[in-house]
Amino acid sequence: MTSVRITVARFQFRARMEEADAPQTCAEFSRLLPYRQKLIHARWSGEACWIPLGEFRLDVGFENHTSYPAPGQILFYPGGYSETEILFPYGATHFASKLGQLAGNHFLTIVDGREHLREVGNLVLWQGAQDIVFEEM
């Protein structure tokens, strides 16, 4: 089981890669580590933040996909109806875009630091985009 450290502002989380359920997504994302981006607040999905990736693609299709991730269940949306993105839910989330409901690959689950998810969501909501870093542990 591969663990990933996720750092957002002053917060650190440990996440488990869901290699059994999303093997292609995990393998392709692992090749990007360490991965740095900006985390912004979601517009359509409820209590979630996201990393908009535009036309960026990983060579993956849908696997272990859901529209209703629990807090800390991180999704990769491979694109299609909307742009490619990573969704970072911190509360009640219904994954969607302006075109309607989406489903993303649940490939990471936060296992340590979940108690700080809402603080991160509020930080991004009220103070704007934050740096996020994914690193293999």
Image (cartoon, rainbow, N blue to C red):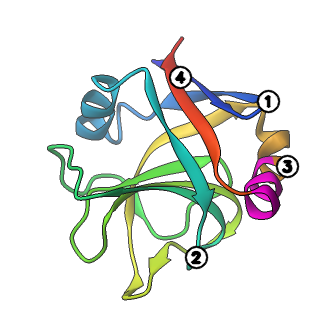
Q: Is residue 124 magenta?
A: yes
Residue 58 point in image, percent of width and height: 21, 44
The prevailing secondary structure element of the residues shown in magenta is helix
Magenta segment range? 120-127
How far is disc 2 from disc 4 in space, using C-alphas?
26 Å
Q: Residue furthest left?
A: 59
Contact (Cβ within 8 Å) of mark 1 with mark 4 = no
Find disc 1 in the rendering and name its residue.
10
Q: Nearer the viewer, residue 128 or 120?
A: 128
Find disc 2 in the rendering and name its residue.
43
Q: Secondary structure at mark 3?
A: helix
Q: Is tag 4's residue or tag 3's residue first in the polypeptide sequence?
A: 4
Residue type of the residue flagged with mark 1:
Arg
Residue type of the residue flagged with mark 2:
Arg
Residue 89 point in image, percent of width and height: 63, 57
- The mark found on residue 119 in the picture is 3
Dot 2 surroundings within 10 Å: few (below 14), some, or many (20 or more)? Answer: few
How far is disc 1 from disc 4 in space, using C-alphas?
16 Å
